[in-house]
Amino acid sequence: MPVMTTDIMINAQQIYKSFGNLSVLKGVNLTVEKSEVVVIIGSSGSGKSTLLRCINHLEKIDSGSIAIENELMVKNNEANQAIYQPEQEIKRICSKMGMVFQHFNLFPHMTVLQNIIEAPMTVKKMKREEILPLARELLQKVGLSNKEDSYPSQLSGGQKQRVAIARALAMQPDIMLFDEPTSALDPELTGEVLKTMQNLAEDKITMVVVTHEMGFARAVADKVVFMDGGVVIEQGKPEEVLVNPKHPRTCAFLSRFID
Amino acid sequence: MDYLVNFIEQFWITLKVSTFYCIDISPQLWEGTKLTLGLFIVTLLLSIPCGLILALLRLSRLKFISFLVNAYIWLMRGTPLMLQIFFIYFALPMLGIRFQSFSTAVIAFTLNYAAYFAEIFRAGIQGVNKGQYEAAKTLGMSYGQTMWRIVLPQMIKKILPPLCNETITLIKDTSLVYVLALQDLMRIAYQLVKRDFDLSPFFIAAVFYLAMTLILTMLYQRLEKYYARYDD
Ligand SMILES: Nc1ncnc2c1ncn2[C@@H]1O[C@H](COP(=O)(O)OP(=O)(O)OP(=O)(O)O)[C@@H](O)[C@H]1O
Ligand SMILES: [Mg+2]
């Protein structure tokens, strides 16, 4: 019987990445299954963002392989150097992923609604009327139906981030990547964004979330990955990694969050 | 008392005469203004797209192209515009390339102003946050789409003040075409002053230049107001 691999959404193996002399990822493996919520934790500088950015082709890896929904984006040659697929192929593969950034990166010259329909219109060549129903549905989902004509600068941080989530979802990705989506927010605004993400998880969308929100990790994650010094130290169910960590470095990291 | 009445009478006559004189010469100055405006508009329409292309090439990842554009900008900003006009007017015909005076002016001004605009555009493009490119990329937008839809619209807001300055400078720089014997506003005013031994043409010319810059300034203010609808 053939091995069923169709449910692997992200398969990153032996990822190495350095910036000049600084090696940031030193052989990271990450697999994410369909509908899984994977939370990546780790101290500052451990390479969490870099890993997400490599998966999303915002950075190029030096060595290793990445496959998205079983389609290879990059793999090693005999000399263990990463060889990428042609640009068009990468673009097609990456279109399966949406990304939410720490600093939102909304388009400031566009209204909330324009932010959401921009990519479907320019990239997918959809007509405005074709995308409007989905755009409005997404706005309702993130609780911002009354803000569609506001500019980003008129919104609070939490509202901005929810627009950013809706904007990414408008491209109908199979996978959502979040890089510290609540780190730039005032503490009282993190809740609304985390709630939105929790709703997404309940909709069974595959998610990879870099965050320091341990409560969210415990409640929503199917798998927690602890990174330190450019490698994955420990991974498993939240109750394993967060409650009964095996590795001393995980213990040390988590002890900072006990309150 | 007599003296005062006499003075007022004299003044009145002078005013009447010079008013008639001004009305008399205005059509000629208006002809010059049309040439000035024509040169200004054609130069603007050509040099803004050229400047934009230069700015994008200057930001190219290909070092060689970026270097070439840099050298071009240095050349254009590092030599007097007058010299560039002379060069195109006198030197190129030696190579068998001959232009009309007006074309010569348009070419010289466009080549020169494209360099200045390129630097303004480059600074504006670089002022757009790097996160904007990343967001656009993760949404699947191509380089062209990112530039056209995301970066350039944001650039415009940032560059309006220097762009306004530069266009006002261009209006006044058009007076350099007197060396090509083109009948622009400045040259016609100068000829009238020489012919009639009267400074009024200069004043009228000043009023015409001021009117043009006033209209420009108001246009830019409207643009700035339009772009004030959002903040970064
Ligand atoms: N573009 C870059 N150029 C050079 N060094 C970089 C670059 N991006 C990241 N780094 C370095 O790589 C290391 C890992 O960075 P990364 O952003 O992946 O860490 P992180 O785990 O996301 O940390 P944080 O929790 O602070 O976001 C850091 O030392 C950082 O300085
Ligand atoms: Mg980070």
Image (cartoon, coloured by chain):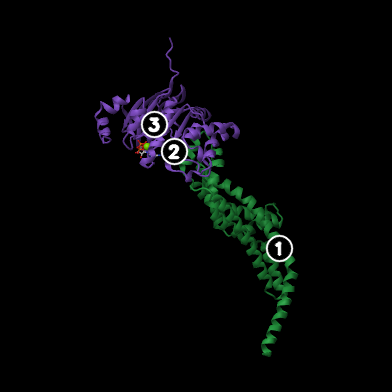
Chain colours: A purple, B green
Q: Quadrant of ligand 1?
A: top left
Which residue occupies 74% across, 66% down? B28
Given this view, does label 1 or label 2 mark the residue nearer the observer?
A: 2
With respect to residue B213, does A72 lie above or below?
Answer: above
Label drawn at residue A161: 2
Question: Outermost residue, front direction?
Answer: A146
**Three-letter amino acid code of the residue under disc 2:** Gln
Label drawn at residue B32: 1
Do callouts 3 and 2 point to residues on the same chain? yes
Given this view, does label 3 or label 1 mark the residue nearer the observer?
A: 3
Q: Chain of mark 3?
A: A
Residue bearing mark 3: A209
Q: Chain of mark 1?
A: B
**Three-letter amino acid code of the residue under disc 1:** Gly
Report helix, strand or loop for mark 3.
Answer: strand
Q: Quadrant of residue A257?
A: top left
Label 3: how many Cα within 10 Å (few below 14, some 14–19, many 20+): many
Q: Quadrant of residue A217?
A: top left
Is residue A56 among what the camera can see? yes
